[in-house]
Image (cartoon, coloured by chain):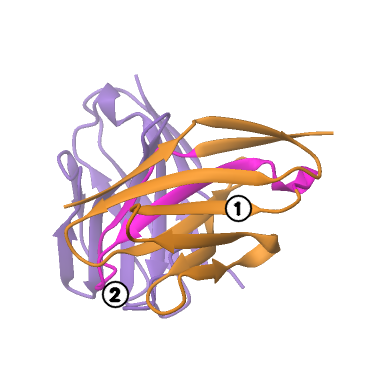
Chain colours: A purple, B orange
Amino acid sequence: NAGVTQTPKFQVLKTGQSMTLQCAQDMNHEYMSWYRQDPGMGLRLIHYSVGAGITDQGEVPNGYNVSRSTTEDFPLRLLSAAPSQTSVYFCASSRQGAGELFFGEGSRLTVL
Amino acid sequence: AQSVTQLGSHVSVSEGALVLLRCNYSSSVPPYLFWYVQYPNQGLQLLLKYTTGATLVKGINGFEAEFKKSETSFHLTKPSAHMSDAAEYFCAVSANNFNKFYFGSGTKLNVKP
């Protein structure tokens, strides 16, 4: 009964370092997405995918890369972290066309 | 283009009182509307959604919302607040392909004993 699993839950980076946030889902959902949550700004879409090999940009894609090689996994890469990327990141998945997002528990990233 | 505005970043009610959380949307296409709830240190979970059909939508935990196209609103209500309703609530809008969701800035609900 895992649902959407994100790792790590907490991470501290220095400016310029790179890292990957992992997201895995076991519900065979075609659609997966990454959001960042900042105080007073709600959630903003970074990237999304409608299936393996297919990705597209959301509202705030700059500074982030994604790939989707399997249905289950959708990692988010920060190539050169900046303090502006300090945030809580959420991965969410859905059956394509169903309209209900299932969220992971979040990954809190601090960039110093 | 789509966007959501939630009026009131914090709402405080007494236990047993009516809960009213406001959401107005902007959409250039027929909107699909959602309310999500977030408990501390957790991800969001769906409360209810409007896609097509009946404009009064019932969700989990006694919440409901009414889609009013003329007012571009989708306010969330609950007749009687419980302490367990204390959380942050997000309104969201999407187009019919559900590829992009646009969330409001959230409303934190505090329930006083």
Q: Position of residue B30 (x, y in %)?
A: 24, 67
The residue carrying pointer 1 sits among few (fewer than 14), some (14 to 19) or many (20 or more) residues within 10 Å by Cα, namely some
**Which element is circle 2 on?**
loop
Q: Chain of mark 2?
A: A
Residue, disc 1: B77
The residue carrying pointer 2 sits among few (fewer than 14), some (14 to 19) or many (20 or more) residues within 10 Å by Cα, namely few
Residue A104 at least partly seen: no
Residue, disc 2: A70
Q: Position of residue B104 (x, y in %)?
A: 38, 43
Figure quadrant of residue A18: top left
**Which element is circle 1 on?**
strand
Q: CA distance from mark 2 to mark 1?
A: 40 Å
When the figure is inspected, residue B51 is found, relative to residue B103, above or below; the finding is below
Residue at 39 percent across and 44 percent down: it is A89
Camera-nearest label, 2 or 1: 1
Q: Chain of mark 1?
A: B
Amino acid type shown at disc 2? Thr
Residue at the right extreme? B113
Q: Which residues are magenta?
A: B81-106
When the figure is inspected, residue A97 is found, relative to residue A44, above or below; the finding is below
B29 and A63: which is toward the camera: B29
